[in-house]
Image (spheres, helix red, strand yellow):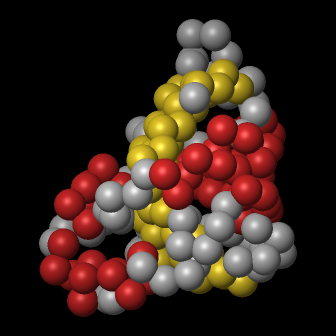
Amino acid sequence: MEFTLNSVEDTVKLGEKLGNLLNPGDVICLIGDLGTGKTYFAKGIAKGLEIKEPITSPTFTIVNEYRGRLKLHHFDVYRVNDIEDLLSLGFDEYIYSNAVNIIEWANYIDELIPEEHIYINIYKLPEENPNGRKITIEYHGSRYDYIKELK
C-alpha cells in the first residue's frame, strides 16, 4: 500500500486510521530518516487507540507505555548500541504481550522483529511540498489481512 500525503495532519490522520484497526499484540515497525514524521504517525496510531495523554518520542528512555482502548508500547531504538541492552530491558516480554508495539527505527534491530509485523516506510517529498510524505505499508503474516481495510 502506498499513500502520498501533503501535511503533518494527513500523516497523523493516516496513523489514526491504522490505530482504529489494530489488535492486541500487533507490531508496527516505523522506518524513515530523521524528521520524516515517525513520531507524528505514532501519535496518530495512539489517537486511534483512544490514548488521551501526549505521545512523545522515547529517544532517551527507549520505551514509553500508554493506556487506551489497547495498551501501547512505543519504542525508539535509534540510540540502542547493543541488542543485549535492549533484551535486558525485557524487550521480548513487551513485544510478545497483548499490547500494540510501535518500534521507531526498527531496521536497527531487524533480528528481534517478530515474523508477523507491519512495516511502514516514511519518505520526505521536499521537491513537491516540504511537508509532503510518501508512506508505504507492508504487512507480513496473515494476522494482518485486516489492513486491507485501510484506505
For the image, the number of numbered tags is 0
Tell me residue 23's x, y (percent).
65, 67
The quarter of the picture where residue 51 lies is bottom right
Residue drawn at x 77%, y 79% is 68
Residue drawn at x 16%, y 72% is 82
Residue extending farthest to the front is: 142
* Horizontal arrangement in the rendering, residue 142 relative to residue 148 (left or right): left
Up/down of 142 relative to 113, above or below = above
* Horizontal arrangement in the rendering, residue 4 relative to residue 58 (left or right): right
Tell me residue 125's x, y (percent).
56, 19
Up/down of 89 relative to 29, above or below = below
Q: Nearer the viewer, residue 65 or 139?
A: 139
* Horizontal arrangement in the rendering, residue 80 relative to residue 141 (left or right): left
Tell me residue 57's x, y (percent).
55, 65
Up/down of 124 relative to 79, above or below = above
Up/down of 61 relative to 103, above or below = below
Q: Nearer the viewer, residue 114 or 103?
A: 114
* Horizontal arrangement in the rendering, residue 82 relative to residue 32 (left or right): left
Residue drawn at x 74%, y 24% is 6
> Can I make out residue 43 in this image?
no
